[in-house]
Amino acid sequence: MKLSSIVESISLEVKTGKNNLQNDVTGVYISDLLSDVMANSKEGNIWITLQTHLNIVAVAGLKNLSGIIIVGNRQIQQDVLQKAESEKITVMSTPLPAFEVAGKLYQLLNG
Amino acid sequence: MDETIEGSFQIIGGNFANAGEASMQLKSKLVELGIDEAIIRRAAIATFEAEMNVIIYAAAGRLQYYITPHEVTIKIDDMGPGIENIELAMQEGYSTAPDWVREMGWGAGMGLPNMKKNSDEFKIDSVVGEGTTVKMIIHFS
């Protein structure tokens, strides 16, 4: 499934990396522990997290993730968005909590 | 590729903003060389965790990598507090990270185990009060 369909289906706000929305999504990984994401996420995964600091950009880049969904309407600092934009990482935001985002994504990807 | 390709980075403790610089550069070198994706992934994970350890725990450190036709070697030496009990530090889930680092999602006690897991050869030496050195080798085949 393309990232763009997911963005549309669950009304995500795309903060950065708008040019990558045609990327394929291979699955989803949910964790707020960055080493866990480094170890266990797969290429092309969407990453659901509430972490918003700079290191999420590096993790997503190193693991070739298809995007990051920041849940719970958390504010993302400008320097993080700038870094994400320059590294071509798609950062998305939603007011929904992780559980609801995960439920919706599960239905979209496995329904 | 006949020659060794090298890179060297100075890492400053507490400088979270630059985390990933060394691993990103190593990753793109390995991509350029057409190295197998699974091996690149392992090198990227091991290098990134090593960078994070210096940033979280040490005052400063240096990361160097050497790519030969057969393998990549990553060496890190830091001016940090040193590790009192290496066996304990290598246990998954054991961490001495402060709370604010854990709140960032680091310090889950996965760094050193991830580094070892993703290396073919892993060597760690540490002197309390002086620092820690880690050498990791990942073979290409």
Image (cartoon, coloured by chain):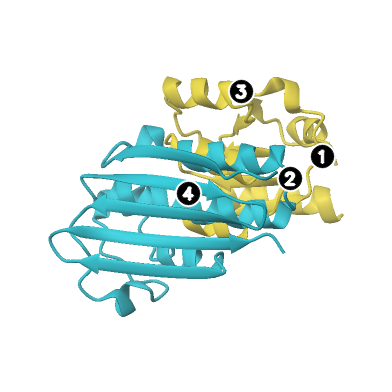
Could you tell me how far apart the alpha carbons at marks 3 and 4 are, in whole angstroms? Answer: 23 Å
Circle 2 residue:
A44
Q: Residue at x 65, y 51 (%)?
A: B40
Circle 4 residue:
B48
Could you tell me how far apart the alpha carbons at marks 1 and 3 are, in whole angstroms? Answer: 17 Å
Q: Which mark is residue A24?
A: 1
User: Disc 2 on helix, strand or loop?
Assistant: loop
Could you tell me how far apart the alpha carbons at marks 3 and 2 are, in whole angstroms? Answer: 17 Å
Asked if the residue under mark 4 is in contact with the one under mark 3, i.e. CB atoms within 8 Å, the reply is no
Q: Amino acid at mark 1?
A: Asp
What residue occupies the far front of the structure in this picture?
B2
Say whether mark 1 and mark 2 are on the same chain: yes
Q: Which chain gets the yellow colouring?
A: A
The chain to which mark 3 is attached is A
Using the rendered image of the protein, determine whether residue B59 is visible from the camera's viewpoint.
yes
Circle 3 residue:
A16
Q: Amino acid at mark 2?
A: Gly
User: Disc 4 on helix, strand or loop?
Assistant: helix
With A111 as the anchor, is B140 left or right in this view? left
What residue occupies the far left of the structure in this picture?
B129
Could you tell me how far apart the alpha carbons at marks 4 and 1 are, in whole angstroms? Answer: 25 Å
Where in the figure is residue B141, as x and y percent of width and height? 72, 64
Please tell me which of labels 3 and 2 falls first in the chain: 3
